[in-house]
Image (cartoon, rainbow, N blue to C red):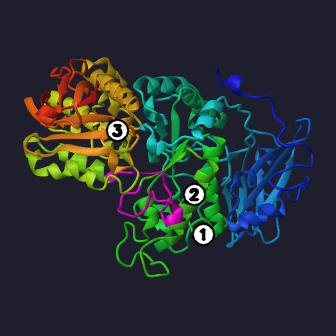
Amino acid sequence: MSFLSRLLPRKTSHNSQTSIVGSSTFINPHSTLGELDFHLINEGRHEKLWEALGSHLLRDKDGALLGTAFSVWAPNAQAVSLISDDNFWDKKTHPMVRQGVSGIWEIFIADCDAGTRYKFAICGLDGRWVDHADPLARQTECPPLTASIVNESNYSWSDNDWMKARANFQPWRSPISVYEVHLGSWKLGLSYLQLATELVDYVTLNGFTHVEFLPVTEHPYGPSWGYQVTSFFAPTARFGSPDELRFLIDSLHQAGIGVILDWVPAHFPKDEWALARFDGSALYEHEDPRLGEHPDWGTLIFNFGRNEVRNFLVASALYWLEEFHIDGLRVDAVASMLYLDYSREEGEWLPNKFGGRENLEAVKLLQEATSTAYREHPGIMMIAEESTAWPGVTRDTSSDGLGFGFKWNMGWMHDTLEYLSHEPVHRVYHHNEITFSILYAWSENFMLPLSHDEVVHGKGSLVNKFPGDRWQKLATLRALYGFMWAHPGKKLLFMGQEFAQNDEWSQEAGLQWHLTEFAEHTGIQSALADINAEYKSRPALWEKDTSPEGFSWIVGDDAASNILAFTRWSDNATPLVSITNFSPVPQEFYSIRMPVAGVWREVLNTDDLKYGGSGITNHSFAVDIDTDLYTTLRVPPLATIWFEKA
């Protein structure tokens, strides 16, 4: 269905002329909020903050335009004016009215329609006027322009079946295979509408269950990849309108593909027109740079302990889940939030009230965000990029955990890539690196990430991290994918690595799609598509991901041969055996003990000729108690093979 067919006629935003924003019950140019709104904002509990603050188009009962109500929180401002297309950006024309002690300023502009560009001119404590974008803007100009835009959504969703099913979704007991995407460089120049065809078809063809977008929240600096956010409620205008993003997400849902969004509450940039010193004071951030600045990124840290700021961030998370039907949020840089001394030397940080290094206010924010998101949107995923050993990241908040559903397993990623960086003959001395993850595999609910962070900043592409000639590099990559998809934990792979991109990712250059004209690259692509298909169809690989009962070693100590073998178990005790040979030496008569008696067949072999392998495969075979379940197998070089009972 086309995008235009998904747009409704202009809808009536309110039931009558006497129904405005939030809990207000009358139109008044001096007030568009009710007492309940003020109370909830002050308490930090307004879970739909975007319905109270920002710009809101108002219509009468027949749908005729009345105008737009504007409101902004700026408690320390001496004065605030609305500047816009409608008043030639003159701050003297539309001064806003402060509502009591709430710190909220308001104005109603008759006949102001959707599409109007605006900002708030704010006179701070020092008497200096600064023009700021709306923190609650739901649409923005395309960077480098910085104005906010009055937005009215006319989108009609067609993903009811998906949303109903999602409410009962149990991601920790389901197949999760995520394709991580930077929208601007997946294919250069594509809009949300074009991606709704091309990306949807591609992800479907390759068998991933979800896509994960690097942040689509508006950001001024493209090379930040979206991780320096200036508009926490507006999708970037680089690729189209908010409703066009809705259409992309809707299209993915109708194709059976979930959508995860990177969400960045850890920091924000210092741009004067955005959140920094918003009312002339450190409103969203801390005044003291020992608490309020990130030394690594040159950004500001939110004051997580302030009710209104915490409310702002929690509402932002809920906004994307509710208004854009996002199926999960991956929270970036959680470690930088949790530790007051993160990337700081002695004397550059302040301890908490107990003298410790833990950021207690950030913990509270994360707990509130995860618990509220799961309460309001059952079936979604909250995912933490947390790179330390902080306890209980995926433990429930009622047990003092952070409440996430999953945590990126950075340890698995680092150890696995380190092991594979060694020449195979030397891997015997690093065998613990490839097996160590099993010792803690169930301490959290894990996702295994081979993300964008591993293919930038001089790290090269995945395929070129491995030693050996070209064939060995490609074979190792196929073996890694087979091993990774069999290993406990959900899966995430950054775009381009599914066809063995040669160069590290560049957002300016985009992906090297021309490589898919060559057999060695389509072989990798075909192997991963088959891995995804086999993975999704076999519950043993995901039903018990979060339980040690779903895994048992067969061969974990054959360091000399670089071979690993283990069994994955489903709820009904159906086994799948995975064997990986990280050596270029094939084993024609490898002795192995299968977990149960019966006839076994090979269901995946990354050494298959159709993938570019050497073609060492196995016929079906039987094992029984007379041989104590032992058999001999052909184990191909630099390959992963999966077996199931026939």
Can you identify the residue that label 1 sits on?
282
What is the x, y in percent for residue 313?
60, 58
Q: Left or right: 214 with respect to 10?
A: left
Numbered marks: total: 3
Residue 288 in sight from this viewpoint: yes
Front tag of 2 and 1: 2
Main secondary structure type of the part rendered in magenta: loop
Local SS, label 3: loop
Local SS, label 1: loop
Per the model, the C-alpha gap separating discs 3 and 1 is 58 Å
Numbered range of the magenta stretch: 386-410
Q: Quadrant of residue 448?
A: top left
Q: Residue at x 47, y 35 (%)?
A: 210
Q: Label 1: how many residues lie within 10 Å, few (<14), some (14-19) or many (20+)?
A: some
Identity, as a three-letter code, of the amino acid under mark 2: Ser
Q: Residue at x 34, y 30 (%)?
A: 498
What is the x, y in percent for residue 289?
49, 72
